[in-house]
């Protein structure tokens, strides 16, 4: 039965394609899908078959353009500085603006369910105020502390013994504390929507009917325990609309796929060091700069083809290794293809993703400031040690099983259907009871 879904997302780089992949899948099943998004994303939204709707008072940005990027986390000098920009410029600071725009759209055209990118607490607040079912899409390894795993963020290994458990308790407190600077702005948004204040920012992330994690469960810690309303629904492996056509470098040497962030992270020098590293090895390199870097500005040796974009899913069928910043999308696509990784985290969630890849035995990590010689040695190690490819293929089999059916779509359809069935009069007017 046709249902209407309102999505809410922002120009968050690698978080955009998986959100729009879910929107596309719902649209292909005949549902109505609108997407509140920055104007810079409207072409991608339309390419997914959904109707783009612009934010009116919430921030507008373009993550591929450093001048237009809302967060500008590439200017931060520390991980805490990066985090503060996300908190103050997307999650909490403009929460009232995101809530106002989302509520206005819901009142103008009611929806059966709201589907928000996890970081948009303002949009989630609007869904709660409108009393409609709300799902949050988490587009990386679940980023909040839970029992049975080290606190996420710094890329910690699992704790062992009493000292390890003490480390986790201390680190959890340190990781959660900076969120609370955003609580006044978040609670102002909640008050404007007629809602009681949240006890904490982290508690507000859980005020949804479903948390859908678009990441392989097999990539996370085996003993980790999650909230009851959280579902691992598998990764989205679609390429973005701007990926273009595949062109491979000449020859038959092993192919190394290189991809750093699709958003601006001041990564040109990193790309050049990786290209220089590949120039010392008997390999072919396919280096994709993404929309944030002009490929014509990247110097590379003759065995490395530099291009603005390429469909990674197709390129990975030929690849022996991927060198990446460990953005979740690139990392998971590589693992789904059974291709091991050399991770060069630049920031954000990338240290955490890289650690999970390492713990799974499917790759290794080098520091972002590493020399080309260090990067070359890492590529050689992954190429020549069959254990990395074996573990990558193990994860590929688990990801294939997890993505055999579209669990995200099934969860969202069930959420909208159950809410409509439980409160038919409210559904008719576009207002339904939250489903817990």
Image: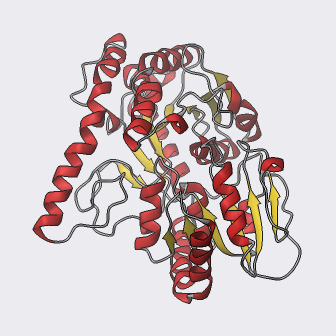
Q: Is residue 373 left or right of residue 351?
A: right
Q: Which residue is at a point 70% across and 29% down the rendered structure image?
A: 40
Q: Position of residue 245 (x, y in %)?
A: 85, 57
Which residue lies most toward the left here?
A: 162
Check the image and report above or below for 120 versus 358.
above
Quadrant (top left, top right, bottom left, bottom right) of the N terminus: top right
Q: Is residue 338 visible?
A: no
The scheme the figure's colours follow is secondary structure
- At x 65%, y 23%, the residue is 53
Residue 254 percent location from the top left of the image: 74, 80
User: How far from the left and from the top, in percent, is residue 435?
Assistant: 35, 37
- Name the side, left or right, on which 183 lies relative to 366: left
User: Can you say whether 110 is above or below 221 in the image?
Assistant: above
Q: Is residue 390 above or below residue 68?
A: below
Q: Residue at x 34, y 53 (%)?
A: 152
Residue 68 sits in which quadrant?
A: top right
Where's the C terminus, which quadrant? top left
The structure residue drawn at horizontal position 29% and vertical position 55%, both measured from the top left corner, is 226
Q: Is residue 110 left or right of residue 118?
A: right
């Amino acid at each position: 039965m046709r249902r209407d879904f309102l999505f809410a997302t922002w120009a968050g780089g690698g978080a955009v394609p998986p959100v729009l992949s879910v929107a596309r899948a719902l649209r292909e099943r005949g549902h109505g899908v609108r997407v509140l998004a920055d104007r810079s994303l409207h072409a991608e939204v339309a390419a997914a078959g959904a109707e783009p709707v612009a934010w009116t008072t919430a921030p507008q940005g373009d993550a591929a353009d450093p001048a237009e990027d809302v967060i500008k986390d590439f200017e931060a000098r520390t991980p805490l500085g990066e985090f503060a920009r996300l908190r103050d410029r997307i999650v909490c600071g403009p929460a009232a603006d995101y809530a106002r725009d989302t509520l206005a759209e819901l009142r103008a055209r009611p929806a059966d369910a709201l589907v928000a990118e996890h970081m948009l607490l303002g949009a989630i607040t609007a869904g709660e105020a409108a009393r409609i079912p709300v799902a949050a899409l988490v587009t990386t390894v679940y980023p909040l502390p839970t029992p049975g795993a080290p606190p996420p963020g710094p890329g910690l290994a699992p704790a062992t013994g009493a000292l390890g458990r003490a480390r986790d308790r201390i680190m959890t407190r340190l990781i959660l504390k900076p969120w609370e600077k955003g609580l006044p702005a978040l609670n102002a948004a909640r008050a404007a929507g007629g809602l009681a204040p949240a006890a904490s920012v982290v508690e507000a992330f859980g005020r949804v009917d479903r948390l859908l994690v678009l990441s392989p469960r097999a990539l996370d810690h085996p003993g980790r325990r999650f909230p009851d309303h959280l579902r691992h629904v598998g990764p989205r492996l679609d390429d973005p609309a701007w990926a273009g056509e595949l062109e491979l470098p000449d020859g038959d040497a092993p192919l190394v796929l290189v991809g750093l962030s699709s958003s601006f992270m001041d990564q040109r020098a990193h790309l050049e060091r990786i290209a220089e590293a590949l120039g010392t090895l008997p390999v072919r390199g396919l280096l994709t700069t993404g929309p944030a870097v002009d490929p014509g500005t990247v110097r590379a040796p003759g065995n490395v083809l530099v291009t603005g974009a390429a469909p990674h899913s197709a390129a990975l069928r030929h690849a022996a290794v991927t060198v990446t910043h460990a953005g979740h999308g690139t990392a998971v696509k590589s693992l789904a293809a059974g291709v091991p990784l050399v991770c060069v985290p630049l920031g954000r969630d990338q240290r955490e993703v890289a650690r999970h890849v390492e713990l799974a035995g499917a790759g290794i990590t080098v520091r972002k400031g590493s020399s080309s010689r260090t990067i070359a040695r890492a590529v050689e190690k992954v190429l020549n040690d069959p254990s990395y490819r074996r573990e990558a293929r193990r994860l590929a089999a688990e990801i294939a099983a997890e993505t055999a059916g579209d669990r995200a779509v099934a969860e969202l359809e069930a959420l909208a259907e159950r809410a409509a069935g439980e409160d038919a009069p409210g559904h008719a007017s576009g207002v339904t009871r939250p489903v817990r």
